[in-house]
Amino acid sequence: MDFAIIPEASVPSSPAAADKFTGGVWQADVLPATQPGGMRGNRFTYAPGARSHWHIHTGEQALVVLSGRGLIQWEGLDEPKEISHGDWIHVQPGVPHWHGATDDSTFVHLAITATGETDWINPV
């Protein structure tokens, strides 16, 4: 069995795709998938007010908030919910949702995607 230790200092960040995020968002691909549709882990850093677009995961995902204050909203929820340091969010497959920073705080989270792909819809 192979294991990997990825030192934080070895993972560069780059601007996230402008067709998937609004505002200043940086992405670090910490654990790339080793097989098609396999598990992957990313770190996202959002400037105040930055957001992901609405999107759907075909597999399960967990978000872990590292710092700042963020918002998450999913289909059927009237208002976004505030999330902050230490919160874990279990994202169900097939549910349209978005997440991002509050207007007055930066926001950093890990996204651990168990399996599947991400289908991007439209800006918030």
Image (tube, rainbow, N blue to C red):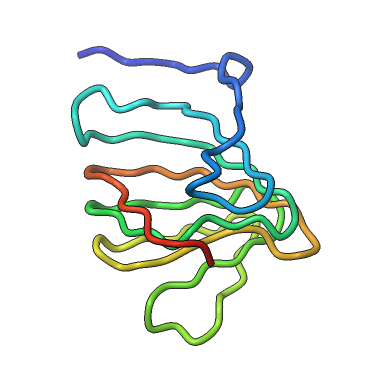
Give percent across and percent down for residue 86: 59, 55
Q: Is residue 17 above or below residue 3?
A: below
Above or below, comparing residue 41 to residue 89 in the picture = above
- Left or right of 1, for residue 28: right
| Image quadrant containing the N terminus | top left
Relative to the observer, which residue lies in front, 68 or 55? 55
Provide residue 48's location: percent of width, then percent of height: 75, 56
Q: Nearer the viewer, residue 66 or 44?
A: 44
Instruction: Give residue 33's position: percent from left, percent from top.
Output: 29, 27
Q: Nearer the viewer, residue 62 or 46?
A: 46
Vertical placement of residue 117 versus 69, above or below: above
Can you tell which quarter of the image residue 36 is in? top left
Query: Disc count in the image?
Result: 0
Q: Give the residue at x 62% y 37%.
A: 26
Name the residue rendered at 22%, 44% in the picture. Answer: 116
Q: Position of residue 68 (x, y in %)?
A: 71, 54
Closer-to-camera residue (18/96): 18
